[in-house]
Image (tube, rainbow, N blue to C red):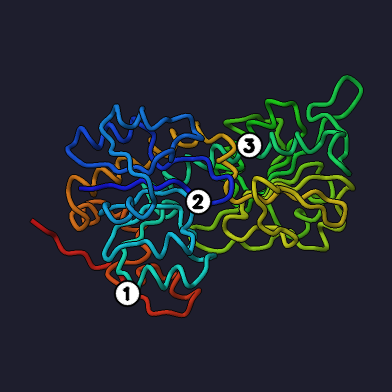
Amino acid sequence: MRIGIPKERLNQEKRVALAPAGVDALVRAGHSVYIESEAGLESHFTDELYRNVGAKIVYTAEEVFQRAELIAKIAPLTNEEAELLEEEQILFSFLHLAVGKKNILDKLLEKKVTAISYELIEKNGSLPVLQSMSEIAGQISVQIGERYFQSDIEKSRGILMGGVTGVAPAAVVILGAGVVGLNAARAAHGRGAHIIVLDTDLDRLRYVEDTVSKNITTVVANPYTLARGAKFADLLIGAIHIKGEKSPHIITEEMVKQMKKGAVIVDVSIDQGGCIETSRPTTLSDPVYTKYNVIHYCVPNMPALTCRSASYGLTNASLEYILSIADNGLSNALMGDQGLSKGVCTYNGLCSNEIISETFNIEFRRLHIFPTN
């Protein structure tokens, strides 16, 4: 199979869909890989490294899309990339279609693209590709909060995450005890913060205590405890995730108004619309804004801050699925892996994801795959 890797076009998106090790595995399996020149450069993967493992370097995104049967990306499609898609192409990417633009979905349907969304692929009850990025985002969220505590940031609180003798540590309140929340709790615990984790799932809260520390305060989330948590927080981390759906606003504008002056919000859920009512997407080049004297950091592609680690992590998580389709063909790969088939959003000109169809009021067709020889 011919696999294409374009350079990412999103502002400050420095990750690449496959590290050289992933390309090497595909080439050794007999497949052709076309990668746009300098696609991996920001992650310190040179064109020479890709050539050395057998990739073919091309010099425009147009050529990548024209040559490839399967496109591997990271960021959701831009309008320009959607126009470059070829008929009946296979696309792997973090698509977030439920919170995206309808014209992108329309283009996928028009061109009969099989669009597989990384964040929807399942395996043993988890979301393996999304998890690789969530682990990074959870850790980074604490680093970001700590950065915006510092006095060189306008309107910051000027506090130390771990405190010092006689001075209390920062209060880090984490909304959600999933993969992002767990990793944020680990990072904050390592920095000596006072940590409160809220979730509606007692088993998740128990897991945080068991794996991180019994000294972490866990609280069942409801409007009362959420309001108290927001008011207490120096750093509020939004880590709510509902598979394939827009995140609910569990922290209201009124709750934000009651927060401490100079407190920091890091809304990791922003790639699915955000879980805080005052959140709006920002970029890595312009990451924060202040509202009601609270600093908001709402960058959808936070893992791009550690682009090399993120590119390796994504390769480790996604390669088996790309190899499966390349080795066995699309139909056989989907038939043989129900978890992979759950990631399919569009197929043969039809929407095969019920949540997306309801969001945009378009026809839903359950995925029907037939074996091929």
Q: Earlier in the sequence, mark 1 or mark 3?
A: 3
Residue farthest to the right, as pictured:
166
Residue 301 relative to residue 343: left or right: right
Secondary element type, mark 2: loop
Q: CA distance from mark 1 to mark 3?
A: 39 Å
Q: Position of residue 272 (x, y in %)?
A: 57, 58
Query: Label 3 is placed on what type of residue?
Result: Ile
| Contact between labelled residues 3 and 1, with CB atoms less than 8 Å apart | no
- Residue wearing tag 2: 9
Crowd band around label 3 with a 10 angstrom C-alpha radius: few (<14), some (14–19), many (20+): many
Of residue 352 and residue 57, the one placed in the foreground of this image is: 57
Please tell me which residue is depicted at 79% across the width and 26% down the height of the picture: 162
| Contact between labelled residues 1 and 2, with CB atoms less than 8 Å apart | no
- Residue wearing tag 1: 365
Crowd band around label 2 with a 10 angstrom C-alpha radius: few (<14), some (14–19), many (20+): some
- Residue wearing tag 3: 140
Q: Position of residue 304 (x, y in %)?
A: 56, 40
Q: Which mark is residue 217?
A: none
Please tell me which residue is depicted at 86% across the width and 32% down the height of the picture: 159
Q: Position of residue 340 (x, y in %)?
A: 32, 52
Query: Label 2 is placed on what type of residue?
Result: Arg
Q: CA distance from mark 2 to mark 3?
A: 22 Å
Query: Label 1 is placed on what type of residue?
Result: Arg
Residue 316 relative to residue 298: left or right: left
Q: CA distance from mark 2 to mark 1?
A: 31 Å
Please tell me which residue is depicted at 24% across the width and 45% down the height of the picture: 324
